Amino acid sequence: MSAAAIDARAGLWHRLSYPTGQPMMNLFADIRSLVIEAVAALASAGTLPPGLDTAAITVEPPRDPAHGDMATNAAMVLAKPAGLSPRAIAEALAERLASDPRVTGAEVAGPGFLNLRLAPVVWQRVVRAALREGAGYGRSTLGQGARVNVEFVSANPTGPMHVGHVRGAVFGDALARLLAFTGHDVTREYYINDGGAQVDVLARSAYERYREANGLSPEIREGLYPGDYLIPVGAALKAKYGDSLLDKGEQYWLAEVREFATGMMMAMIREDLALLGVTMDIYSSEKALYGTGRIEAAIDTLRGMGLIYEGVLEPPKGKTPEDWEPREQTLFRSTAFGDDVDRPVQKSDGGWTYFAPDIAYHYDKVTRGYDALIDIFGADHGGYVKRMKAAVAALSGGRVPLDIKLIQLVKLWKNGEPFKMSKRAGTFVTLRDVVEQAGADVTRFVMLTRKNDATLDFDFDKVLEQSKDNPVFYVQYAHARVNSVLRRAAEAGIACDDASLAGADLSGLSHPAELALAGKIAEFPRLVEIAARSNEPHRVAFYLYELASEFHGLWNRGNDDASLRFIQGDSATSQAKIALVRAVGVVIAAGLGILGVTPVEEMR
RNA sequence: GCACCCGUAGCUCAGCUGGAUAGAGCGCUGCCCUCCGAAGGCAGAGGCCAGGGGUUCGAAUCCCUUCGGGUGCGCCA
């Protein structure tokens, strides 16, 4: 298979067609079907040739409100295959669409855009739908139940999680929530790297703490883990083994201590993740792959495909390691799948390289029947992407797409200056430190305020600031304001439970500023799908910021224009306006739910 | 040397997988509370989307190339 073929499979998400007759409210999808129906009608009327491909037709909100409520590129997309000018097609479409009660205006603009203006009732329906669907507003069937495995964190079980892991944990969990929200069957998985040399180091380090617990002075030699967090492990070892492991050779205790210590580390890591609100469905062990023949089986499968061979790699150009010497190795022909060089799976001593169990592990995921795999790596593992994709492409026969998201660094700031971490100086910031200082909700939101492959500043002072500099606060404040209005309205005797609001006459919602806010609410389901298709949960955070901004704006317009205040003299008008306000609250809560952040009811 | 990521306002960053006159926050300038929470809002100034080619109705977005920054490059995971 060529690299291009792999790219073509880059995401299952891109191939899923739009579900038909979907029950959920998605205005853009609705209007798009309307446009496509119009195209079909024109085709049967002979205005357009039959059988045109409508896949490239999009319906989106124009950037400039002067261009109406919805814009479609249909005419421009169809012009060439139809052999007609874009404007001619646009005009024919405009005429047909204008007869729909939802459409109050259809005009051709620019090179052939068709700008639609929609009736107020359309926006009122959006508000109603948000109220009816509540926390499920924006949910979609995009994924059609596809089974997706998201592997993330996978921190080495050699110590507590540090701040570098937090972003990956939050990103992975938010992505999992996003995919679940869009109709995917999601599994959260953690791959425990408990098979390599680093867990031997852990065992030796823990053993020194065990000696310490027995009253001996520990020898934390160079290369061992010096952290205090191993002291309890030493104590626990003493509790279990007494002094029976003292003065014994490593071969006597290494395996047992390793098992014991990694077990305790994993328990600690689970607790750390729980602090962030992250729960894994599956923990997979690297070590469990050894001695079971599964690595051999995975490699043999590749061998059966002619993708394993004995060969000698060229030294890297421009930077030859000093001890380089040509050596015959067992290689995986990853270049057949777009990788730059073939990759060794066996070391010269006959042992597996780290790549081999990873192949076996991904083979395991493939055979477990997932429709798509997602790996979340630190950005420093970028060089690993191609070979991993190659392995999965080979082992799944191209059936299972693997998307790998790289998470960039988090730069910590404190007191207006960069916060340098150092293990030696004891300024090593753990996940626990971050969550204890900032709180899980704030931490999660902030970690999603940047695209995953851009570095992110985490400023301990700013994230707790209650001002609009702080996006978390800004969004939460909007949600709190919504509740504030609801409280006031209830005091005024206005029925404002969701059912009453959803059933209310919404014709009082007519001001352009109000309808524009409803328009923002209408974008949410579409935004969620876009975010899910690209595996980019940060888009939800940005959307929420924009929504909050529009809401704050409308709120303040009430200062100048009393007719825009939400609570009015008559309760019918009030209900309509409060329905809009509550719909904003619903969407903020739904969006925060995707991010795993709890909306606040009040901030005093 | 090669591969991947990045380069957008003074600063920090979005930008709908190709749409119209490129957006937001900070900072700067000037405004708005007898009024649902001013912990907010409005307005103004600020741009060769790193440079150059190409693809097409149309490019910040896709392709090629140059420059600049980051990451990685056989027996560490």
Image (tube, rainbow, N blue to C red):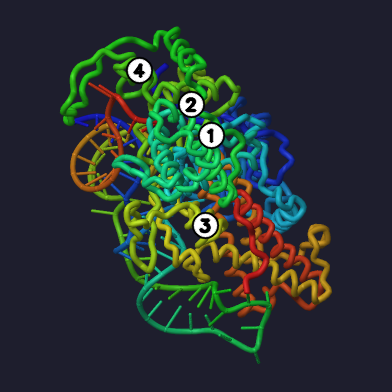
**Disc 4 residue type?**
Gln
Q: Is residue A590 left or right of residue A498?
A: left
Above or below, A470 relative to A570: above
Q: Nearer the viewer, mark 1 or mark 2?
A: 2
The residue to which callout 1 is attached is A78
Give the mark, 1 or 2, whose residue is nearer the N terminus: 1
Relative to the observer, which residue lies in front, B67 or A390?
A: A390
Check disc 2 and report the residue beneath it. Answer: A287
Q: Chain of mark 4?
A: A
Question: CA separation, marks 4 and 3?
Answer: 41 Å
Residue A91 in sight in this render: no
From the image, state whether disc 3 or disc 1 is nearer to you.
3
Q: Residue at x 38, y 11 (%)?
A: A308
Give me the chain letter of mark 3: A
Which element type, helix, strand or loop, lies under badge 2? helix
Task: From the image, tell me which residue sits under label 3.
Answer: A435
> Are dots 1 and 2 on a single chain?
yes
User: Can you tell which quarter of the image residue A348 is in?
Assistant: top left
- On residue A346, the disc is 4
Q: Please tell me whether mark 4 sits on a helix, a strand or a loop.
A: loop
Tag 2: amino acid: Lys
Residue A401 visible, this orientation: yes
Observer-side mark, 3 or 2, equals: 2
Upstream in the sequence, badge 4 or badge 1? 1
Where's residue A439, x and y in %?
55, 60
